[in-house]
Each structure stands twice: as structure tokens, then as C-alpha cells.
């Protein structure tokens, strides 16, 4: 495989992977209004757990890490997702019930920093600052894949996972559950007075979104074969926010567009460009700045994103009802008004 | 069904409050609200500005916790229950300043309201999709009927933040009705709407009463109170000053002094 196709499939992998990550953050922020500034922490937990449950025992590997169960794909990946959800459950039970959106955001930023420091410095957990390496390539032995053929294979496999997760997410967001989450996003006080347990639904949203974060992280560690703390600096959360804000909050197709524009074209494509003579690494700095500028421009001129959240029309609006569609009926107001303002003189005071 | 202004039957109360108190950083907003809301009737909650009406409504709907006192829906003590639990007991509310779910369409605003929807559970979405779909179809038909009644049918697919002030008031009432409450708490439903719409909203409220719903409404327009309310609770300085029919309260000197006199004077000097 030529270098060109290697780059193309690498970009395809990141497109699909960030689509999954964006769907996870979107259900939390775009659908439910939870500002999860620790999102990248959940991605990292998913990545590490996928890694250490898929890797053999650490003895003799030159690395220090927990578990080392040698589980096959996709069991290790699912465990990565579930562990990220378990972390979300702990965080939610402590913080989600008591804190309003902005305070919760601050707590989550702190959580992200604490997670980063613990994992970076406590070596026996996930090999500290060196991170995990020599992570097995999933299914490579089964399909007899070489290093070259693994990249397109795994990019396509990630595509399949992304399609399955998109289907699942679409079912959730189109269902009454998705509508209730959006009601909480719009006004959680009103949702509560309509009988919705705001905590329960926010918890559900956190668990689903964190599972997506964990799976997205798990795919990253298996694609690259390594993962260390430089891959998930707390600021990386804002790249995923940029994906959903640029693409379109609350719209799954918009998330794919956002993943293409931000993650694929702006973050990863420039990394493959030849460096500017005399200024190695300058391109990477420039593209981070471009993402920041793009985010500001989008928020100023098109806050709804490239593909805005669509108006959700009920599939039953035109349903036949007793042989007649509801749309055929004349619009009438069958309740008779009461003569209040005409019969009696105005007698009011200011409210 | 009780006719309007029929004397309140003893012991048939949808909602009872005893000595509710609430202070904000030492400032007493509610100093002892005690009243009963008769079942199946329209009760007005009136009083001068700062009387604590909205605070009482917030306590009743669970949006605020009282410092002391008790509240009962039917025979169940619901003192300081969370909002969603009070709503599930059958008490729904609207807001003084409309709080529509702006990103949702008008139809979706109504479809959020029914309790315990199958499609709100992850398990049902994936393992009982037929049940969730059937229920959604039934809810949609009912929501469209209600929108038709409230004259909002043509706006069903419009985002609710794009509605006018009067339309938002109607939407809030329609959304409350969609939840099939036993008690509907309306916080100034006629405030800021045109006279023709006041007549219409009055008609809707009378219709809800005819369907057996108990209505509690904060209202400043005494014409509205006179025309449609069966029972009146007067709050002043955070406590219950008097309860009864408006005609009787007009003869109550304390009430006239605290509130009605101010209103009557305001209307006669205009």
C-alpha cells in the first residue's frame, strides 16, 4: 500500500472515530445540555481499559499496567465503553444531582485534571507518562493482516462500528427519550414540573455519552497500538466540542460533517503536510489556531452549525384517523369564549 | 359537576396547605399560608404585589422548598417533594412569564407532557418498539386534538420560541392539559394578553372545570375572578388573609383595605 493510501485510511479512521466521539458528547451537551468538560477523560479511560484488558499480563513486557487479561476484540472494546460509563455513574451520583450546569462544568474540568495527574503520575496503573504500547492489533491474526493491510481494515471496521452506533443513537434521539432530553436541555425546571426526573434523564444521557467516549477511545488505542497522556490533554475536550459546534449541535449528520471539517481536515490532514523549512512543528500550531478561529467565527455567524438541528415533525401527523387525516380537518376552536372583557368594566391592578 | 359559585362542599379538597412559610436570606416571603382548594372548582389566588403568591405557587409545584408547614394533595402529604414527584401526583403548573420549551416544536411541547411514556425507556426503545410506537401514535392524536381545541393546530411544526406571547400562554395551558392533571396551577394566565384572548382563555378554563379538573389561578383581573372563579384565596404579606367567594370578600374590611380597596380605587380614578 502506498503512503498516500496509508494517509487516506488514517484520515478515514479519524473521521469515523470522531463521529463516534461527537455523538457521545452531542447526547450530553447537544441533547441534554450537560457541559461535560471532562469528556476527554472518559475517552482516555475507555482507551486504557480497552488496552489493558486486550493486552497480555504485564510481566516481561517492560510496562506496568493493571489487568492484562488478553481478551479478544470486541469484548475489550465493550469493557472500555462500560468502564467509561461506570466512571460517569460515580461522577453523576456525586455531582449531577446537586450541581447546576455551570458549577457542574467546573467540577468536570477539575475531574479531567485530576484524572490526568493520577494516570500520568501513578505508573502501576497504565504505565504513567510513557503510556501503553505494543497494544495488540485486533483481529490481525484471524485475518492474517500485515502492518500495511491493518490500517485500511481497521479504518473500515471503525466505519462499521460508527454506523452501528449511529443507528443506535438515531433510535434514541428520535424516540420520546430524545425529546425528553431536549426538553431538559431547553428548561430543566419546566421538564421537572411535567413529571420528568431530571436527574434520572441526565444520568441516562451521561451513561450513554460516556459509553460512546469509551468506545471511541478504545478504537484509538487499538488503531495506533499505543496511548499516552499527551494524546488526551484536558484541552482535547474542546476539539470534540469544536466538532459538534461546527458541524451542528443536535444533528447526527452535522456531527459527521464536523468530524470531517475539524478533526480530519484541520487537525489530522496538516500533520501529513511537509513541514515549513526552518519551522518544524509550525503547521501543527497553526492548525490549532485555525480551529480556534473557526470556532469563534461559527459561534458568531452561524451558531447553529453547518447542518443545524432540524425541526422534528411527527411521523404520525398525517396518520389516517377514522378514514380522514388530521390535516384534512378544518381548524376550529370548539370551546366558547367567556365574555369577560366586554361584559364588565376593566377592574385590574398591575401584576 | 358543581355550578359556579356553589358553596364549597365540606371536606372535598384537592389541595390543602397549612402554615407554609418561606424566607429568603432573612426576608419572609411567605409567613403562614393556610388554605384549602376545593376539588373540581376554579380557585383564584389574589393579593397585592409582594403578597407571596408566586412563592406559594413555586412551593406548591415543588420548585421551592418551604421552611415549614405542610402541603397535601388529596390525602397524600407531599410537603417539600421534588417537582417531578408532585407532577406525578397530578399537579401541573404554568408560569407567569411563559416558559415554553423553545427548541421543541409546538407539537413536541405537548408530547413531552404525558407521564411514564414507554418510549422514554431505553429497554422499550430497543426491545418493545411496537408498544412505544403505538403509544406515541395515540399521544400524537391526542396532542393534535388539544392543539386543534386551543387554535394552535396550524403552528404544530413551528419551534415554540417563535410563537407570540399570547400563543405561548395558550401553549403552556395546552401542555398542562396534555399531562391530564387533577390540579392545574395557572400563574397569571391572562397577564399581557389581548381582551379577546382573555375571553378565550376564560372559556378554556371553564371547559377544563367542566371536565372535572381543579384549577388554581393567580389572577389580578377581578373581572376574570368575578366571572369564572368559584372560590377566592386572598394572600397579603405572605399569609392567608381570607378565603371565600369574591362577593363575600368585598364585604370584608380587611380584604378591602389590603387589596380590593386599592384595586377599586385604581379603577375609579382612571
Image (cartoon, coloured by chain):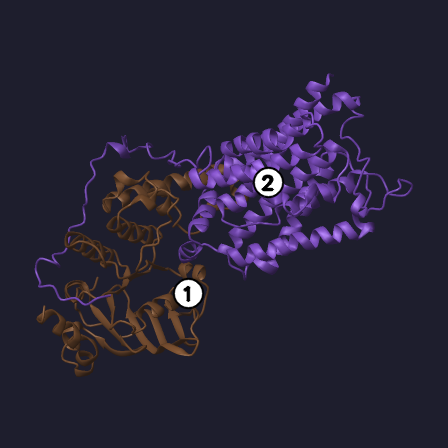
Question: 10 Å neighbourhood of mark 2: few (<14), some, or many (≥20)?
Answer: many
Residue at the farthest right position:
A60
A351 left or right, relative to A173: left
Residue at the farthest front position:
A278
Quadrant holding the C terminus of chain A: bottom left
Image point (52%, 39%), residue name: A295
Q: Quadrant of residue B148?
A: top left
Image point (17%, 79%), residue name: B256
Q: Chain of mark 1?
A: B
Q: Is residue B12 visible?
A: no
Q: Which label belongs to residue B73?
A: none
Chain letter for the purple colouring in the rendering: A
Closer to the camera in the image, A62 or B213: A62
Closer to the camera in the image, A315 or A1: A1
| Spatial CA span between label 2 and label 1 | 39 Å
Per the image, label 1 sits on a secondary structure element best described as loop
Q: Position of residue A112 (x, y in %)?
A: 65, 52
Q: Position of residue A24 (x, y in %)?
A: 58, 41
Please identify, in this view, whether the residue under mark 2 or under mark 1 is nearer the observer: 2
Q: Quadrant of residue A147?
A: top right
Which residue in the structure is indicated by mark 1? Answer: B62
Quadrant holding the N terminus of chain A: top right
Image point (53%, 54%), residue name: A200
A27 left or right, relative to A224: left
Question: 10 Å neighbourhood of mark 1: few (<14), some, or many (≥20)?
Answer: many
Q: Which label belongs to residue A239?
A: 2
Q: Chain of mark 2?
A: A
Closer to the camera in the image, A165 or B181: A165
Q: Is residue A176 visible?
A: yes
Q: Colour of chain B?
A: brown
Amino acid at each position: 500500500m502506498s503512503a498516500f493510501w496509508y494517509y487516506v485510511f488514517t484520515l478515514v479512521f479519524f473521521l469515523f472515530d470522531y463521529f463516534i466521539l461527537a455523538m457521545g458528547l452531542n447526547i450530553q451537551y447537544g441533547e441534554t445540555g450537560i457541559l461535560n468538560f471532562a469528556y476527554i477523560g472518559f475517552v482516555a479511560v475507555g482507551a486504557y481499559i480497552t488496552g489493558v484488558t486486550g493486552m497480555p499480563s504485564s510481566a516481561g513486557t517492560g510496562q506496568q499496567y493493571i489487568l492484562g487479561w488478553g481478551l479478544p476484540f470486541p469484548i475489550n472494546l465493550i469493557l472500555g465503553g462500560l468502564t467509561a460509563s461506570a466512571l460517569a455513574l460515580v461522577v453523576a451520583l456525586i455531582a449531577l444531582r446537586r450541581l447546576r450546569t455551570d458549577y457542574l462544568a467546573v467540577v468536570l474540568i477539575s475531574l479531567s485534571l485530576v484524572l490526568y495527574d493520577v494516570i500520568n503520575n501513578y505508573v502501576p496503573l497504565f504505565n504513567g507518562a510513557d503510556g501503553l504500547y505494543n497494544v495488540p492489533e485486533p483481529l490481525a491474526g484471524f485475518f492474517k493482516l500485515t502492518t500495511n493491510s491493518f490500517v485500511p481494515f481497521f479504518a473500515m471496521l471503525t466505519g462499521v462500528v460508527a454506523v452501528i452506533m449511529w443507528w443506535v443513537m438515531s433510535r434514541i434521539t428520535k424516540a420520546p427519550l430524545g425529546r425528553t432530553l431536549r426538553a431538559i436541555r431547553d428548561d430543566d425546571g419546566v421538564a421537572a414540573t411535567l413529571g420528568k426526573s431530571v436527574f434520572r434523564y441526565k444520568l441516562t444521557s451521561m451513561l450513554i455519552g460516556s459509553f460512546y467516549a469509551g468506545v471511541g477511545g478504545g478504537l484509538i488505542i487499538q488503531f495506533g497500538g499505543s496511548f499516552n497522556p499527551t494524546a488526551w490533554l484536558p484541552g482535547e475536550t474542546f476539539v470534540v466540542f469544536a466538532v459538534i459546534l461546527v458541524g451542528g449541535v443536535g444533528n447526527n449528520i452535522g456531527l459527521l460533517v464536523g468530524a470531517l471539517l475539524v478533526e480530519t481536515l484541520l487537525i489530522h490532514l496538516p500533520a501529513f503536510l511537509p513541514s515549513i523549512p526552518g519551522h518544524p512543528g509550525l503547521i501543527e500550531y497553526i492548525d490549532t489556531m485555525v480551529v480556534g478561529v473557526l470556532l469563534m467565527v461559527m459561534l458568531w455567524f452561524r451558531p447553529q452549525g453547518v447542518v443545524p438541528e432540524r425541526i422534528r415533525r411527527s411521523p404520525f401527523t398525517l396518520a389516517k384517523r377514522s378514514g380522514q387525516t388530521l390535516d384534512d380537518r378544518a381548524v376550529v376552536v370548539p370551546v366558547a369564549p367567556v365574555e369577560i372583557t366586554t361584559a364588565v368594566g376593566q377592574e385590574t391592578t398591575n401584576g | 359537576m358543581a355550578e359556579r359559585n356553589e358553596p364549597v362542599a365540606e371536606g372535598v379538597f384537592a389541595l390543602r396547605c397549612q402554615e407554609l412559610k418561606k424566607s429568603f436570606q432573612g426576608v419572609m416571603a411567605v409567613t403562614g399560608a393556610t388554605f384549602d382548594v376545593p376539588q373540581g372548582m376554579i380557585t383564584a389566588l389574589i393579593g397585592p404585589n409582594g403578597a407571596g403568591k408566586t412563592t406559594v405557587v413555586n412551593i406548591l409545584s415543588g420548585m421551592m422548598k418551604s421552611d415549614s408547614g405542610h402541603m397535601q394533595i388529596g390525602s397524600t402529604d407531599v410537603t417539600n417533594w421534588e417537582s417531578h414527584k408532585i407532577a406525578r401526583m397530578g399537579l401541573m403548573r404554568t408560569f407567569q412569564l411563559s416558559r415554553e420549551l423553545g427548541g421543541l416544536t409546538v407539537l413536541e411541547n405537548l408530547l413531552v407532557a404525558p407521564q411514564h411514556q414507554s418510549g422514554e425507556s431505553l429497554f422499550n426503545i430497543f426491545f418493545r418498539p411496537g408498544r412505544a410506537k403505538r403509544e406515541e401514535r395515540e399521544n400524537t392524536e391526542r396532542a393534535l386534538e388539544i392543539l386543534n381545541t386551543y387554535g394552535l393546530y396550524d403552528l404544530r411544526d413551528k419551534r415554540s420560541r417563535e410563537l407570540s406571547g399570547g400563543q405561548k400562554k395558550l401553549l403552556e395551558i395546552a401542555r398542562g392539559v396534555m399531562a391530564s392533571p387533577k390540579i392545574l396551577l395557572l400563574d397569571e394566565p391572562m397577564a399581557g394578553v389581548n381582551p379577546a384572548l382573555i375571553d378565550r382563555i376564560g372559556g378554556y378554563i371553564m371547559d377544563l372545570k367542566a371536565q372535572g379538573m381543579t384549577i388554581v389561578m393567580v389572577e389580578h383581573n377581578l373581572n376574570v375572578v368575578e366571572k369564572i372563579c368559584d372560590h377566592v384565596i386572598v394572600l397579603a404579606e405572605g399569609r392567608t388573609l381570607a378565603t371565600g367567594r369574591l362577593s363575600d370578600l368585598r364585604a370584608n374590611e380587611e380584604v378591602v383595605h389590603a387589596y380590593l380597596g386599592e384595586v377599586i380605587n385604581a379603577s375609579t380614578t382612571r
